[in-house]
Amino acid sequence: MNAARTIPDTRLSVVDLRATPPAVVQTLEAGRGPAGVSVNRAGTLALVANREEGSVSVFRIRDARLEAIGKVEIAAAASGVSHVAFTPNGAHALVTRDGDFFITVLAIAGEVVTRTDRTFSAGLRPYGLVIARDGRWAAVANIGRGNGDEDTVSILDLSGAPATWRTVQTITVGQTPEGLQISPDGRMLAVTVMNGSNKPEASPFRGPGLVRTYRMDGLRPVPAGEARIGTWAQGVAFSTDGRTMVTQNMVERTLQVFAVAPDGALRESAPAIALPGGGAALRIADR
């Protein structure tokens, strides 16, 4: 027994946000190393990417409770299945694989989820992924090797049939882009860039955390705004009107709040909000 060894967990927790205070009401088994979690727009199905197993677990949602109903084998465990995201119509999902650099397309018919033969590539180690509300495009964060290189975000064209989905743009955004989000109107993309803030003080690649916005010109991201944020920043989210943006700082255990101008410029608009721990994921309910 090696007490220092990290062993992947398999548990998935369900939190009731209507309770006061919010409480865990279920704990279920997924696969090894559950990472990305997504719920379809209808609120009837949840998918969980099992990072250490190369699979996606499928859960039925009924009466605010989950029930395991299947598992989809994606690839070998080393493929590093990282995140899974539903298309808005719930008919498909995309799965990022940062271990072998592929994106896999899943087909969904009711509660039946299957892996299709369609895979395509983005950049080096595709990790986080978000799909626009109209389902026409998506963005994926290519987190790279973490060795000081400037990393990228890719834009995926989802406007045709799934067999034609592909990467159409890849832009350089900085070291380790992890959090990314599309504004509700689909006109803006926000990316948190670690920028070496998670590296030792003596590292030549250490820098301040950054959040960057990009205005979408069709499927082409155009640099728009930038602001300094905290250390090892991960999550980012827009308000439902797209005028406010929140970023999440792991080390400082805070949320930062920014006003977003129509052109994408950023202005910190409120004091930092303290968290009880280092946040790693951030979402706002999609209504």
Image (spheres, rainbow, N blue to C red):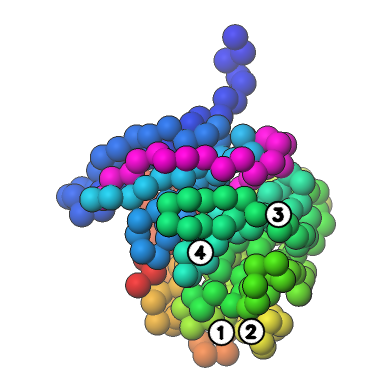
> Considering only order in the chain, which callout, 1 or 4, is on the residue closer to the N terminus?
4
Task: Answer whether residue 32 is visible to the viewer in this image.
Answer: yes
Q: What residue does disc 1 label?
A: 187
Q: Nearer the viewer, residue 265 or 173?
A: 173
> Mark on residue 91?
4
Look at the numbered discs 2 and 1 and tell me whether their residues touch, using CB distance below 8 Å: yes
User: Residue sitting at 78 percent across and 55 percent down?
Assistant: 124
Vertical comparison of 52 with 224: above or below: above
> Considering only order in the chain, which callout, 3 or 2, is on the residue closer to the N terminus?
3
User: Residue sitting at 47 percent across and 36 percent down?
Assistant: 30
Amino acid under disc 3 = Asp
Label 2, secondary structure: give it: strand
Q: In 3D space, how far apart are the residues under numbered discs 2 and 3 (Cα atoms)? A: 30 Å
Name the side, left or right, on which 79 lies relative to 86.
right
> Considering only order in the chain, which callout, 4 or 3, is on the residue closer to the N terminus?
4
Q: In 3D space, how far apart are the residues under numbered discs 2 and 1 (Cα atoms)? A: 5 Å
Q: In 3D space, how far apart are the residues under numbered discs 4 and 2 (Cα atoms)? A: 25 Å
Amino acid under disc 4 = Ala
Q: What residue does disc 2 label?
A: 216
Magenta part of the protein: which range? 64-82
Amino acid under disc 1 = Arg
Q: In 3D space, how far apart are the residues under numbered discs 4 and 1 (Cα atoms)? A: 24 Å
User: Residue sitting at 34 percent across and 35 percent down?
Assistant: 27
